Image (cartoon, helix red, strand yellow):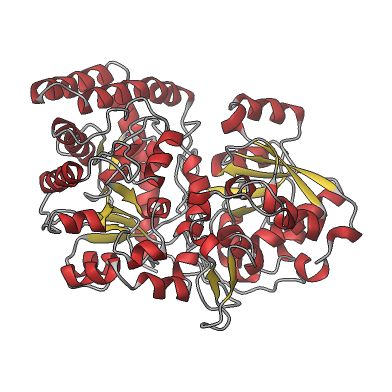
Amino acid sequence: MQSKKRLLAYLIAMCLAIGGFAACGDSGGQEGTTAAGDSGGQGGTTAADTQADGSELAPVTLEVYSQAANFQGEQPGWTAKILKDRYNITLNIIAPQAVGADIFAARSASGFLGDLVVLDNVDIQSCITAGLLVDFTEEMMSLGAFGEYKGQLDYYNSALEGVEPGQYYAWPTELANTSPTSFTPLSAGSPGTAPTVPWDYYKAIGAPELNNLTDLIGALKQMQDMFPTNAAGEAAYGITLWPDWDNTSLENVNQLTKWYGQEVPFGNSSILLDVDGNMTELTDDDGAYKKILQFYFDANQAGIVDPDSGTQNWDNVNQKFLNKRAYLIWNDWQQGFWNTSERAENGENYIMAPVGDMKLYQPSDSYFGTGRAFAAGTTDPVKKERVKMLMEWMTSPQGITEIMGGIKGYTFVDSTEFPGAFDRTPIGENALGDNNPIPDEYGGGIYRDGMLQINQWTVSSIGTNPETGYGFDPRVWPMTLKQSAVGTLNDWSDRFGTASPFQYLVDHNLTKVVPYVNVNLVPDTSDISVIRTSCGPIVCDASWRMIFARDQAEFDTLWATLKADLDGFGWQELVAFDKTKYQALVDERARALQG
């Protein structure tokens, strides 16, 4: 679990290269609540308006406890300079993923978690109950973006025990100013998850029609046989996997279950939930989890699975993505490791290869948030005011643009062709991949280190910037879209007869958009927690063994043994608990569709 949420750092960073999400990872036990709310209300004068020059303020260090962070210590680089220059704020980040989960209990016991905290919903509630979080109503209502998101803020806070009507304790992560049931494709119309391959290599093997996963394996094998190494001579594979995001099951399997209309909720449940709200146990013989295990097994039998897959970590894998050493990627944000406008023009970008029997499970925009929230934990009036300034920056169009686009004047500039919009600079197009040194005038260091190390944001990248009328995400800036509509996308459109990958899925009935609702889920009881903790390693160990099984007979035996072993650890009790738990999610999705 510790490394799993490293994905979040890259979700933010991918917005530079071509673009988190949704946020990924287990959100704990509480995933918000939903209903369309009033978006009215008035925002106050912003901190950015009143304090553009932080030199008039006394220096303040804010302790930020973030469950999403992978970095512990003082925020470095270009983000540090922005916050220091404008608000005379220094961030000291506390990251349980970096130093261990025990720090949560220790700091809670001390009575102080942080001046600003980013917590899973279930922990937001427990910390309000314990008195570790403070009423932030006055400060929240003064934020310039308060009126725009008031409906979502009302609904979230009204669901928290101990919060009175009209009080605001927390701001849910990644709110969207779209609608509860819309899906906003990014990256030239890419779906959130789909089989995605390098167009030049796919074209080189004839861009064959793929009817099923067997055909996909065949295509990947042809690519690997034709291009066994990258340009630097390093070995490349059709598929590369990694174990350090695994939880109760394999994350690389969980993500691909969405290709066939099912998801493993939050990556840590014992069930598969389909696009129509039906639930079945993870180990169902006809379920997508076994189907994807079979896919990986078949791929390994074909010799196209990276032999390091079972032992490498995410750091190794992202270097392989950056250097074109894996030919299948499964999520739109992963395109950012390689895709650029130059490669798009040359027909070298990664793009979806549609598989005819898919039924993609596509969540809608995160209108109500993504299962975490920001909250204040300080009663010190000076620090509380400075937390408000930080929140103003993180919720303002200027701040969101900087978080997602980088350094104005260096990685992005005002557009000359599209008035009011922004353009990425040549440096900004692949700032994450190149990770070049940053000039001292912008804060120094290297680019990735200077990104906001809280590793979570207040507003979703798919939202619209109210000041420009364009999206926040650099992938949907008009110049980026213009640059994308060449080479790769043109060739792809000619081959498949559709303007974009997502439109292809819609036209061919290969996807269904599911409302992304933010629901209060029942936390595990102590007994269920023990069962879940016991069953997870059994599922993961058996799953890896199945991928690398000698033959189909061993694969089948391992599956049967897994099911028998799990029943000895209370698996059926866990399945029954999860079906009841996630019924709240099913009910809220149905409610969202009713308007």
Task: Give me the residue at 17% from left, 56% from top.
Answer: 204
440 vs 248: above or below:
below
Q: Position of residue 263 (x, y in %)?
A: 30, 45
Task: Give me the residue at 18% from left, 24% from top.
Answer: 559
Q: Can residue 289 be seen from the camera position used here?
A: yes
Using residue 584 as the reference point, say whether residue 278 is left or right of it. left
Residue 151: image quadrant is bottom right
Q: Position of residue 197 (x, y in %)?
A: 26, 52
547 vs 400: above or below:
above
Q: Nearer the viewer, residue 418 or 561?
A: 418
Task: Give me the residue at 31% from left, 47% from top.
Answer: 329
Q: Position of residue 158 (x, y in %)?
A: 60, 55
Q: Nearer the viewer, residue 78 or 8?
A: 78
The residue lying furthest to the front in this view is 232
Q: Position of residue 155 (x, y in %)?
A: 56, 59
Q: Can residue 370 be seen from the camera position used here?
A: no
Give the quadrant of the C terminus.
bottom left
